[in-house]
Image (cartoon, rainbow, N blue to C red):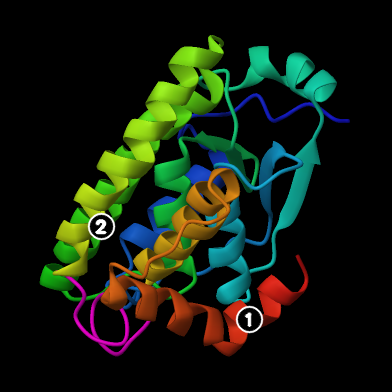
Amino acid sequence: MRHLSDTWCCVPVKEGEEHLHRRSTNPQAPNTTMAPSNLKLIYFDGKGRAELARMLFNYGGIAFEDSRIGHADFATLKPTLPFGQVPVLEVDGTVYSQSLAINLYAAKLSGLFPSDNLEALKSDMFSQSLTEMEGPFVEFMFKTPDETKKAELKKVFIEETVPKLFTVLEKMVGGKFILGDKISHVDLQLLDVVANKIAWVFPTFSLEAHPALAAVVNNVKADPKVAAYLAKQ
């Protein structure tokens, strides 16, 4: 496996820097971002923190290399990574880290990030709430070796943390999707959290108590692009 580029953490190579400069100073440039010709998403061979970015890129028809590494590969790569962790996204030779930043970038490239400022504010509020819920999830899944303590944390998570948050988020649903009738990145994030995190650990989990959120998840699954992606998994 080849090593990552030595340029990372938002430090572009000279040629890329010139390209960005030309784009930013062009008064005719549109607000949309053209997809780079070379995108490489690097993560383990699992869903975890990279699945949402994969879904977003696929939804937008954005070509990217889905590089799935083993733990031996990670041990070699770790010293070269900006924060010593994955996922990372290599964009035309520059390496970027942090899953939240990668997901937002993927959402914008794929046309799933709101152009309206208030809708963007609402989606960020919803998205951040889901992201914060992942903290206690990671705590009992990967940071608590004691089985008794792990069981206690899992119980609190599924019986208190999730219902409390979803009761609040239920009231924010604007229609068929979270922002209304148009799908956005936060709808895919909700699906990812429910299907690939909560239901992964708690197979009997149901959104029955939160019908608006359940409808959003079902509508996302029914979207032709999402359905096509899920069918391949």
Say above or below: 52 vs 11.
below
Query: Looking at the picture, which amino acid does disc 2 mark?
Result: Phe
Residue 192, given in percent of the width and then of the height, sits at 50, 58
Taking 219 as reference, is 105 above or below it? above
The reply to whether residue 98 is visible in this rendering is yes
| Residue lying at 67% horizontally and 17% vertically, measured from the top left | 78
Query: SS class of the residue under badge 2?
Result: helix
Outermost residue, right direction? 1
Q: Label 1's element?
A: helix
Q: Is residue 33 visible?
A: no
- The vertical placement of 62 against 45, above or below, is below
Quick check: 111 left or right of 122? Answer: right
Q: Nearer the viewer, residue 163 or 54?
A: 163
In the foreground, 32 or 56: 56
Dot 1 amino acid type: Ala
Residue underneath mark 1: 227
Tag 2 residue:
166
